[in-house]
Amino acid sequence: MQVSIACTDHNLKRGNGDHSKQSATSPNVVNQARAKFRTVAIIARSFGSFTPRHISLKESTGKHTGMKYRNLGKSGLRVSCLGLGTWVTFGGQITDEVAEQLMTIAYESGVNLFDTAEVYAGGRAEIILGNIIKKKCWRRSSLVITTKLYWGGKAETERGLSRKHIIEGLKGSLQRMQLEYVDVVFANRPDSNTPMEEIVRAMTYVINQGMAMYWGTSRWTAMEIMEAYSVARQFNLIPPVCEQAEYHLFQREKVEVQLPELYHKIGVGAMTWSPLACGIITGKYENGIPESSRASMKSYQWLKEKIVSEDGRKQQAKLKELNHIAEKLGCTLPQLAVAWCLRNEGVSSVLLGTSNPEQLTENLGAIQVLPKMTSHVVSEIDHILGNRPYSKKDYRS
């Protein structure tokens, strides 16, 4: 805050000029006024500027589990840096009993973030998630539950991001999970058929109604996220706090270039998924497509084609080199890959998707590998991958 002495003197003279000629002939009055405002200016300068201070969002570590917690974007919501996703697995690949085992292992390891969606297994994933939470009697306040809306049903009104589907879809999700609210509701993809103002107003409504605490986006472009933020600011609505994005060794640009700019400008964080590239990074596809793998499923023909392509074979060759780094660090390749994602400070949480307890326990071990991700190790990985994206800042330097 700054006080202009020149303007003050001008106002004093203008205010006193016609009213009292004594002030013009009495230098003591003017001098006293000047001294008074100089004192005010000195005090104001001592307090410094009233510009917003930099927010320091510190990472913390669980005392008993070693799990690390970060803020979701620049919101106050603290999420475990590793979360458990339910895509494909819950209600699909695994039994309800295995799903309970996975959630129990995750929760006891310090994971508080559990992610699902209305479309997963046709709503079955949400039902299983809710049943487990109820059965385990976990405190609702200790959990961060997120779900995603877009594909809700076959009817035209049962999909998309219209006000109707956002409200009805979230009510349906809450009923399936037997919950009063979710912590974050995500728009599972952009909707070109619905005006952005309608989307933001509907998300603001469900938050104000207590059905959700925050809202976020998934698979949105930086421009679409910025548009949502601008609409929220224009109409005094609630902006998104997070983007869910794919992020792994072979998919980097959005999370490493686009989202950091949004984080610093408007506070949108990153919750990432598929850290093992749908299992590609585990090395399970090195010698073909195993029968029980995700790529063997009919609905994942695209993954099979990706694995057997020329690019897929090149990726397998790079994974062999990366495996040498993992061996030097005393960890597995999946642990290295997950720790590599976590080393990015812009990532609030990495969602894990596993089909058995052994895989989950292994992936959770990435927390212990994180301190070993030195700049030298990261440079080695970048050299092998050869796909590091460059931001405007890199070009300027």
Image (cartoon, rainbow, N blue to C red):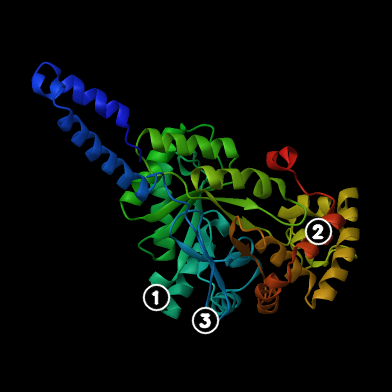
Q: Is 161 placed above or below 209 here?
A: above
> Regarding mark 2 in the picture, which secondary structure is present there?
helix
Q: What residue type is disc 1 on?
A: Arg
**Could you say where residue 189 lies in the image, as x and y percent from the top left?**
56, 44
Report the side of 362 relative to 376 (left or right): left
- Which residue is at a point 39% across and 56% down the rendered structure image? 213
Horizontal and vertical percent for residue 219? 60, 45
> Is disc 3 in contact with disc 2, using a CB cutoff of under 8 Å?
no
The residue indicated by pointer 1 is 139
Which one is earlier in the sequence, the residue at label 2 or at label 1? 1
Q: Is residue 21 above or below residue 241?
A: above
In front of the other: label 1 or label 3?
3
Specify few, some or many for label 1: CA neighbours under 10 Å numbering under 14, 14-19, or 20 or more.
few
Q: Disc 3 and disc 2: Cα gap in Å?
A: 31 Å
Residue type of the residue flagged with mark 3: Lys
Quadrant of the drawing holding the N terminus: top left
Question: Residue 224, relative to residue 152: is it above or below?
Answer: above
Location of residue 221 by image quarter: top right
Q: Residue at x 62, y 62 (%)?
A: 350
Give the residue at the far top of this rendering: 18
Which of disc 2 and disc 3 is earlier in sequence? 3
Quadrant where the image shows the C terminus:
top right
Q: Which residue is mark 2?
A: 379
Q: Residues within 10 Å of mark 3 (few under 14, many from 20)?
A: few
Q: Label 2 amino acid?
A: Ser
Sequence-wise first label, 1 or 3: 3
Q: Is residue 219 visible?
A: no
Q: Which residue is mark 3?
A: 63
Residue 14 image position (x, y, % from top left): 19, 19
- Would residue 355 be seen by someone viewing this image from the given angle? yes
Placement of 109 over or under 384, stated as above or below: below
